[in-house]
Image (cartoon, helix red, strand yellow):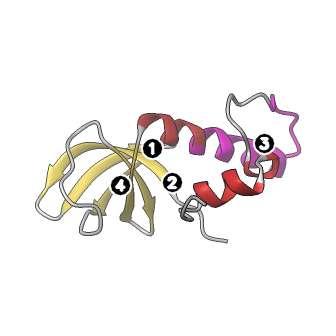
């Protein structure tokens, strides 16, 4: 399974950016996402920004990653994350989340 990590841009360089997220600092490639500014959130996979995220979406992904980490460590975790997990979404909501056209 491939997992992207939400990271916040701290400094811009030509074609790259320094970013922080989940206790890590990385220099990432920004070719796929266009212009960024310090403070922007991106989804990072293998040191490359794949998608520009809203702060709310970055928070949702981080909360989901926290749930996964807790489950892997056998810890109980508060499941009231404040948004619908994909397993609780309707088929229409899941299709919209995945970018399917609206009927």
Q: Are marks 4 and 1 in contact (CB under 8 Å)?
A: yes
- Which residue is under mark 3? 70
- Of 88 and 15, the residue lying toward us: 88
Is 48 positioned to the left or the right of 79 in the image?
Answer: left
Mark 2 Cα shell of 10 Å, populated few (<14), some (14-19), many (≥20):
many
Residue in view at x 51 percent, y 54 percent: 5
- Which residue is under mark 1? 21
User: In which quarter of the view is residue 26 placed?
Assistant: bottom left
**Span highlighted in magenta in the image:** 61-79
Is 71 colored magenta in this rendering? Answer: yes
Q: Are marks 2 and 1 in contact (CB under 8 Å)?
A: yes
Q: Are marks 2 and 4 in contact (CB under 8 Å)?
A: no
- Which residue is under mark 4? 26
Query: Majority secondary structure of the magenta segment?
Result: helix
What whole-number distance in Å separates the C-alpha atoms at marks 3 and 4?
24 Å
Q: Are marks 3 and 2 in contact (CB under 8 Å)?
A: no
What whole-number distance in Å separates the C-alpha atoms at marks 2 and 4?
11 Å
Disc nearer the start of the sequence (3/2): 2
- Which residue is under mark 2? 5
């Amino acid at each position: 399974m491939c997992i992207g990590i939400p990271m916040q841009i701290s400094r811009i360089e030509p074609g790259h950016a320094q970013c922080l997220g989940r206790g890590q600092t990385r220099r990432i490639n920004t070719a796929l996402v266009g212009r960024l500014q310090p403070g922007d959130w991106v989804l990072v996979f293998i040191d490359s920004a794949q998608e520009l995220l809203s702060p709310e979406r970055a928070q949702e992904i981080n909360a989901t990653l926290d749930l996964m980490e807790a489950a892997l460590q056998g810890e109980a975790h508060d499941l009231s994350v404040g948004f619908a997990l994909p397993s609780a979404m309707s088929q229409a909501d899941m299709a919209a989340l995945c970018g399917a056209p609206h009927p």
